[in-house]
Image: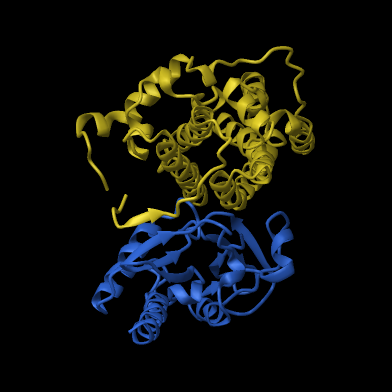
Amino acid sequence: MNPSVTEKPVAHAASTSSTALFNVLLQIADDHLILGHRVSELCGHAPMLEEDLSIPNMALDLLGQARLLYSYAAEVENQGRDEDDLAYLRADREYLNCLLVEKPNADFAHTMLKQFYFASFMKLYWPEIQQAGEPRLSAIAAKASQEIAYHVRHTSQWVIRLGDGTEESARRMAEAVGILHPYTQELFEVDENRQTGIDQGWLADPASIKQPWLDAITAVFKSAALSVPDVPFGQSGGRQGMHTEDFGHLLTELQYLQRAYPGSEW
Amino acid sequence: MNNQLQPDSEARRLQAIEIAEQVPDPELPFLTLGDLGIVRGARITKSQIVLSLSPTYSGCPAVQVIEEMVSAALSGAGIDAQIERVLSPPWCSDWITERGRERLLANGIAAPVSGSAAKPALFENVMVCCPACKSDNTELLSDFGSTPCKAQYRCLSCLEPFDYFKCV
């Protein structure tokens, strides 16, 4: 980052437990970085020009939001690490993203559905985070809320177009739902860090948006001629650093430049 | 002594804002930062002027370039200023000035739907006028365009594709 540019410092409430805040910031930042990276893998590979502009634009939003969160996390940690150290130089077990966002793009149905699940969640969660009132997080939430609305609109259109499309596209979309839906439960999980935030009042409980999220998903699925599967269990572990096999491969590519050319900057 | 210094530093502060507002946007060079409404103000600290700017989109690649251009413009005028990035309240497309909207239109980009119409415009299809033939018979091609702030439309009357500056 340009050294003459400073983020406006906002003191956070004295009652905030900084370790919990740091970890929650990392969880949300990692969700955005990893999904942003996954989406960026498709830059130049989309099925048509309009989509080839849409996909990197969504990746850009996600990476921009991740950057704001990492900068703040680095300040909260106050150990001399910066946003790049946090984004590029941690080991796999130190990443705290949910498993959904690291799932491979596979086909276009998987790519759009994954993005749709996550965007629909953040569209509801950002306003709650903003409401909780942790000053800096609240400011990031207000900005991100504006951007995520377009991700929801764009990805819902694709879920509908593919789900209610040809026999082949409907089959693939239904398959993506079957594979990805069990990963959505982790979005609503509350680990000890989030619990601290909820108890201290600077974080909203994601469980409070579970029903509105399900309603939003159901409405789109209805237009897409898809049904919401009843999944009795969820895949999780990401918040504790336990990732899927695909994650190591993703990280290899994500970290390559910083590992090969340490300290390089734009 | 104070009496002499105070008005002088206030004049410098106002000059800093004026200079920043004249800097062109790197992606839409026919617009100034003043037209875009991203210059938030300036304040005086003990040693220097701190000038505040807001990003239009959090991942907009132009943000850093804009900050460097503003720094350079201020140094050129002999003003030693620090640039501060302000997120809250977030920039929104309603902050584009009337002149900015006219400049967009003159350069073939439809201006964002503004005011009370802006909120539903995020979620529903809005009526966007073709900047070439002024017809409102247009269709959305994609919510995302060549920069984070634009969407792609097509006019169904004159068949011209055009950019729409999205409302946020």
Q: Is residue A184 above or below residue B60?
A: above
Q: Is residue B150 left or right of residue B81?
A: right
Looking at the image, what colour scheme do you see? by chain
Rendered hue of chain A is yellow
Q: What residue lies at 24% left-to-right and 76% top-to-bottom? A: B76
Q: Which chain is blue?
A: B
**Residue A93 higher or lower than B138, as above or below:** above
Q: Residue furthest left?
A: A261
Q: Residue furthest front?
A: B1
Q: In the displayed image of the protein, which residue is found farthest to the top? A: A233
Q: Using the image as rendered, state which of residue B75 and residue A186 is in the foreground.
A: B75
Q: Residue at x 34, y 67 (%)?
A: B46
Give x and y (percent) for residue A113: 62, 32
Going 39% across and 77% down the picture, which residue do you hit?
B13
Q: Provide residue B87's location: percent of width, then percent of height.
A: 52, 56
Total labels: the figure holds 0
B127 shown above or below B19:
above
**Viewer-closest of A145 and A52:** A145
Task: Identify the image quadrant of residue B25.
Answer: bottom left
Against B98, residue A216 (above or below) is above
Quarter of image, res B81: bottom left
Would residue B62 be found to the left or right of residue A3 on screen?
Answer: right
Image side of residue A26 versus residue A188, left or right: left
User: In the rendering, at what x and y percent does residue A68 appear?
Assistant: 46, 45
- Residue A229's x, y, as percent? 75, 20
Pick whichever, B111 or A64, lies toward us.
A64
Nearest to the observer: residue B10 or residue B156: B10
* Point 19% across, 34% down: residue: A261
